Image (spheres, rainbow, N blue to C red):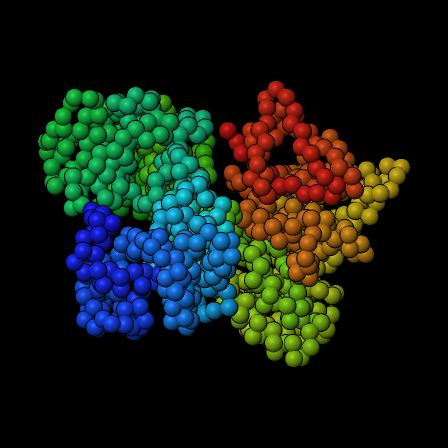
Amino acid sequence: MTGTDPAELISRLKRHRPQMVELASYVSLTVSVDRAFLRKARLRFLPRTAAGLEAELWFSPLVEAAGSRALLLDPEASEHLRRDLAQRSPQLLRQVREFTVAEHTRAPLVVRLYEELLWSALQTTETVDTHARHHADRVLRMVSGEGVAAAVADDTGRWALHYARRLPTHLLGRDDVWRIQVASCERLGLGLPDDPAGGRTGVTVQARARVQHTLAIGVTARSDGIVLSRPPASGARILHAQGTRHKVRLDAVSSLAHTAEPIRLDLLDGQSVHLPFTVVQRTGPDGDLRMSLSHPGSALEVAVADYTGSDPSAAHCAVLLPDGTIVLHRGDGSESGRVLAESPLTTRSDLVLSADGTTVSYVQNNVRHHRSLRPGVHTTADPTVENVQGSSSSSTGTDATTVASRARDGSMDVRATTDGRILATSTAFPGRRTTRLIGQAPWRVSSLAISADAQWVAVVGNDSLLMELPLAPGRRPRETQLRFSATRVFAGGDGGWVIAGTGGPVGLNTEEGRSYRIMPEVDPAGGVSPTWGHGCVLVDTPVAQMDVLTDIPGVDCLLVDLNRASGQEHDEFALRLVEAHRRGVRVVCGLDVSDAQEEVLDAVCHWLDQSADGLRLAGSVGAAILNDVRHLVDGYDDRMLLCAPSQPSDRRNEFHVVPASPLISTLGFALRSRTMAGGAFEQAMTQLRREIEDAFSASFRTLREGRVFQWGLELPPALPQSLRKLAVAILLSLPGCPVLPGRMLLEDGGGLALRRLLELRRNHLALSRGDCLVVDVGTAYVLAVARRHGDDAVLCLVNVAHIPTTVEFRPGQLGATTRLQDLFDGSVLTLSDETSLTVPLTAGSVRWFRCIAQ
């Protein structure tokens, strides 16, 4: 009936086929009219008519769609028929209503709901509306999967959306109807329809949350980007996000990007998504970063110019995307324009920018094209173009050269061989060519370039290391650790470098506000310890509670003390271990090594063969048995070995453990003395800061030496229940492997929100792997530590006192940090260059801030 006035159509039909219109009115209070219902309606309200009237309605213009078993009235015509009947005869309308209810007593709940809504639109009583809301709530619960199978909930959602579009606009504006539509779309992984009422963001968020669940997502950091998997792939880092079995939405953004605009990813069940990133950075002659940009996807080529300004008629950098699009960037990294591909079949290659950045050149369909970026200048074509950058080009031959480059003035050639040697050949004096070895790369060189002043050679090789080799005598080589894998290097006109590559840190944000930072990890212990174990939190639990704890977001590793387990629990543990692995949670076994050496080694072999992820040794650990266990663990891939912090370590052993017992003892004393007078509390807090500085400075020296840095940070003994959560919050703010009693996560309430702390620690590498610096905040009552891992920095504040207090940060005290973002509520505090910043802390509170630089 599109374009047709329903009132005009019905009026015309009434003049020629009045009984057919009457029959349509008697079935207008339902959404789907089957043959039996239509027959009964005719016999009930038009008993003197023949069955042919049913066929007449079936094929009339009042019907939007008809199948072999049922018909659907046109929504607009149906609405007009209902209102006309209500005006003509309210008593007859009630009879139609009673008839419809009686016939559809066993109809699906969705059908009955929409019939209730149609009826409520014709009535003004509160009772009718309450009845409709009751039905809507029942449908919403079904769509949410409450008490029904997943397949039933899916079908309910499909029918709810099918019938919803047939409702009048004023009914679609009801919040309960909108909730059902939102929940159905979310459940089925569909986009939301237009909101007829508008402005119902809160209602939408609540409805989506009804059908969402916390799901495990696997993420693997690769040299070129990240791989997301659902269910998590083997060995992947486990993240948690709200979603449905059909879809989980994530926003990804490269930390090196020139724009903060995220990339929306819809991860389906059973799907694996690879998201690569192309990165380009420019450094100055002193190594300072002057530009950074990143593009999602693997760029085919990158070209750069000496020009670094912001004139829109010139570009500093050009990136060729796989679809043939060329993206142009200014000197600050911002995008200045695009050269779109002419068709999906367009292929481009050999991308070049002129030195002044005003011309981009590329080969398309075997023809070299020159496109001027200046207004009014057209594209030209010719067979050749000069590469003004002099960047490296690949070659092979008898000299086993992989890449080579020539200085801009032609005075020097540099090449790399297949075995990583860097050779420089002087061409300043024809006939007197001299070649010398200037350096050795640890990998096969993929690109090299000579600086504009011909004093340095930059070398990269699909690695995060930039090597700079001097061409002039008297200078030492330089190495710079990059935050991505470099594949190309260009010489900048100012004496710096432009480095292009892939990967780098990636931020992942979930719709419910969780934030994760993903970056390729390098094992600083040289493989002695598995990377996953560095700074992980161990949740201590009995065998019986393993399953329930693995469902808590933030729990990545369980510690199960098998010394306290019975024989039956040992059998149960083997089954629960398999289930924990299926959910992406690792399990470390606690073993007592006080028994005979042979029994200890048998137990170690047994549980490692059962795929336990690690061992935690307790009891009297001697040097001999420790070495034997160490060698056994080395025979298994990716296994962790921990010792209780009170165990002495033999510095002559390969396995080195930094004792933590002085720190734990001091922490317990400080917490217990928080109400003492006479300066005892202040002295205890001063000692605690000293213990933290001493323990972790020694620990990181050990880490740099290539030894193992991991030991269990257990709660101080004899600590009152009221102080245990505060102690856990402090341990989660420090490096190491905190041991958290599982029962504390299962307890209700708790102002410190331990589950949230646990999840935040896992989401920020600074908290699990970062270094530790004690910060002076002007009060002895507050423990403040700054944690940093790469460019991820977190400030942890813990008010140990039983009274409120404040801390003050002086201008410049936190270095380059300009803003503090609260990790709990997302609020931001801005630091000034002129005035101090005061941060309030309630009694016994914990605040974690992400440190954001300008």
Instruction: Tell me which residue sits at (87%, 42%) in the image.
Output: 676
Nearest the eye: 567 or 676: 676
Nearest the eye: 704 or 763: 763
Nearest the eye: 8 or 137: 8
In the rendered image, the vertical position of residue 474 relative to residue 220, given as above or below: above
Residue 699 visible in this rendered orientation of the protein:
no
In the rendered image, the vertical position of residue 178 relative to residue 100, given as above or below: above
Instruction: Tell me which residue sits at (32%, 71%) in the image.
Output: 44
Residue 297 drawn at (x, y percent): 32, 45
Q: Can you tell which quarter of the image residue 608 is in?
A: bottom right
Quick one: which residue is furthest to the top in this view?
Answer: 834
Count numbered badges in the picture. 0
Q: Is residue 8 left or right of residue 229?
A: left
Residue 72 drawn at (x, y percent): 27, 62
Q: Is residue 327 left or right of residue 173?
A: left
Instruction: Tell me which residue sits at (37%, 38%) in the image.
Output: 294
In the rendered image, the vertical position of residue 182 relative to residue 434, given as above or below: below
Residue 771 drawn at (x, y percent): 60, 42
Q: Can you tell which quarter of the image residue 504 is in?
A: top left
Q: Is residue 803 left or right of residue 127?
A: right
In the rendered image, the vertical position of residue 437 relative to residue 91, given as above or below: above
Instruction: Tell me which residue sits at (51%, 62%) in the image.
Output: 584
Quick one: which residue is furthest to the right in this view?
Answer: 678
Residue 834 drawn at (x, y percent): 61, 19
Residue 745 visible in this rendered orientation of the protein:
yes
